[in-house]
Image: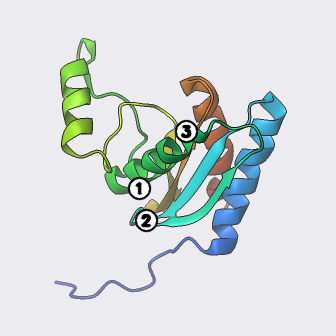
Amino acid sequence: MALVTRNQAKLTLEGARAVLEAACRKALEINVPMNIAVVDDGGHLLAFERMDGAKPASIAISLVKAQAAAMRRAATGPAKSADGVNLPVALGLAIASPAEQTPVRGGFPLIVDSQVIGAIGVSAGTEDQDSEVARAGVAVTEKM
């Protein structure tokens, strides 16, 4: 039985900035100003950018998406059942634990060597646009 874990991968500020920059480039490419948050594996903010023209109301949403993806170790989005989206469960989880669950897409964990090192959350566009921009940030960690 191991009492201590060693050599755990950690997201650095430089890494968080690289993720943020890749996401910003994608947002510029699709011409949608975004709020982009990058957090560590515990959901603590490492880097944030509110692009010129991004909706101020989406600032907190981008952070919640990043925190939820980091804490759940999974992409954000509605709870699903065999029949599709389970709206009552999705909303219930979001109300019960708002920092760890959101039914809104656009948050993704950052994974290196099968280990979650952080997460990115993007908000201000449609859910598809938010997810596209976030995936551009995720792609940076896939090359690490």
Q: Position of residue 57 (x, y in %)?
A: 54, 38
Marks 1/2 in contact by CB < 8 Å: the verdict is yes
Q: Secondary structure at mark 2?
A: loop
Residue drawn 62% across the image and 54% down it: 142
The residue indicated by pointer 1 is 70
- In space, the residues marked 3 and 1 are separated at their CA atoms by 18 Å
Q: Secondary structure at mark 3?
A: helix
- In space, the residues marked 2 and 3 are separated at their CA atoms by 22 Å
The image shows a total of numbered marks equal to 3
Q: Which dot marks residue 41?
A: 2
Q: Find residue 56 and report its image quarter.
A: top right
Residue drawn 23% across the image and 46% down it: 97
Considering depth in this image, is 8 or 69 the residue closer to the camera? 69
Q: Which dot marks residue 58?
A: 3
Q: Secondary structure at mark 1?
A: helix
Q: Position of residue 91 (x, y in %)?
A: 25, 28
Kind of residue at disc 1? Ala
Residue drawn 81% across the image and 29% down it: 31
Q: Find residue 25 and report its image quarter.
A: top right
Kind of residue at disc 3? Ser
How crowded is the residue under tag 1: few (<14 C-alpha within 10 Å), some, or many (20+)?
Answer: many
